[in-house]
Image (cartoon, grey):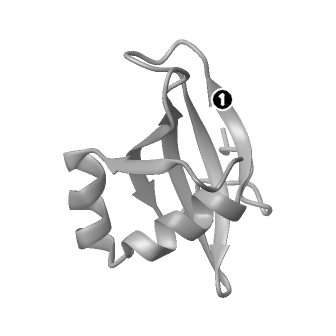
Amino acid sequence: MVTDRQLVFRTHALRRMFERNISVDDVRHVVATGETIFEYPDDRPLPSRLILGWVSVEPIHVVAADEASSDITMVVTVYRPDPSLWSWDLRRRRR
């Protein structure tokens, strides 16, 4: 992922970040250094992806969508993955 993209935060993402005490810097770090673990090509208005990143020892998931025609990444939502809902490596949702 190119790290010089501009991040634009959806209102939903900002609300969740506030509720979950996740900072803008935390999200920037995850988007810049994290791993895309799932892609949602059919999401609208833009295809999105789930990024797993670590801030210190804490895992964070960011759902983001890259605008192909610009240097903008839209941050859709942000959360700390619940280990009871995710595989041990936090890359796959449990069934």
Which of the pair 22/85 is nearer the observer? 22
Q: Residue at x 38, y 76 (%)?
A: 23
Q: How many labels does the image show?
A: 1
Q: Give coordinates of residue 6: x percent, y percent.
A: 45, 49
Q: Can you say whether 46 is above or below 53 in the image?
A: above
Name which residue type carries label 1: Glu
Q: Tell me which residue sits at (45%, 39%) in the image.
A: 72
Q: In this view, does 44 lie to the left or right of 17?
A: right
Q: Mark 1 points at which residue?
A: 39
Residue in the picture at 60% in, 42% down: 50
Q: Which residue is drawn at 45% across and 75% down?
A: 25
Residue 84 in sight from this viewpoint = no
Q: Can residue 23 be seen in this view?
A: yes
Q: Quadrant of residue 40?
A: top right
| Picture layout, residue 78 above or below residue 20 | above
Q: Is residue 95 above or below residue 90?
A: above
Q: Is residue 72 left or right of residue 93?
A: left
Rendered location of residue 31, percent (x, y):
59, 56
In the rendered image, residue 63, in percent from the top left (x then y), is placed at 50, 44
